[in-house]
Image (spheres, rainbow, N blue to C red):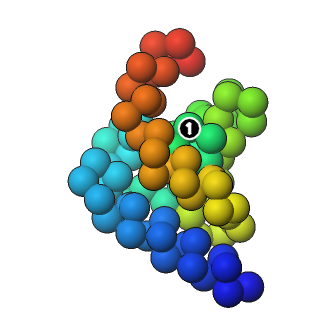
């Protein structure tokens, strides 16, 4: 699907932006997972934690393996700053 290729390219671009090149939780380099509803990127270890929280809190997708929807990529672009406020409530 051409759309997926395009969306993945946008995700890759987002991953290169300042701050997105580190896991949002543990600051490990090169996150390959993301929460599509929170709009943050994370490493595989932290993706497991997010998965355990439930999809109603964090909808975990793989940057490489899962298909993405246009609006999920948009969320990843827009919501990054809000995550910091959210952390105390889910940990
Ligand atoms: Zn991590």
Q: Is residue 42 visible?
A: no
Quarter of the image with the N terminus is: bottom right
Task: Say if 52 sits above or below 28 in the image.
Answer: above
Mark 1: C-beta under 8 Å from nearest atom of ligand 1: no
Judge from the rendering whether residue 38 lies leftward or rightward of residue 61; answer left or right.
left
Foreground of the two, 70 or 83 = 70
The residue sitting at 49% across, 60% down in the picture is: 32
Task: Say if 48 sits above or below 66 in the image.
Answer: above
Foreground of the two, 48 or 67 = 67
The residue sitting at 61% across, 48% down in the picture is: 36
Q: Position of residue 16 (x, y in %)?
A: 31, 64
Task: Say if 67 sits above or below 42 in the image.
Answer: below
**Farthest residue, direction bottom:** 2
Q: Position of residue 9 (x, y in %)?
A: 49, 76
Judge from the rendering whether residue 48 lies leftward or rightward of residue 14; answer left or right.
right
Judge from the rendering whether residue 59 lies leftward or rightward of residue 10; answer left or right.
right
Foreground of the two, 10 or 65 = 10
Q: Helix, strand, or loop for circle 1? A: loop
**Residue under numbered circle 1:** 38
**Quarter location, residue 55:** top right
Q: Is residue 53 visible?
A: yes
């Amino acid at each position: 699907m051409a759309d997926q290729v395009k969306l993945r390219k946008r995700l890759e671009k987002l991953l290169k932006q300042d701050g997105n090149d580190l896991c949002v939780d543990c600051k490990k380099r090169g996150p390959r997972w993301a929460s599509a509803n929170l709009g943050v990127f994370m490493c595989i270890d932290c993706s497991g934690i997010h998965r355990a929280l439930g999809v109603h809190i964090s909808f975990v997708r793989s940057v490489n393996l899962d298909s993405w929807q246009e609006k999920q990529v948009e969320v990843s672009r827009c919501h990054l700053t809000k995550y910091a406020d959210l952390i105390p409530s889910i940990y």
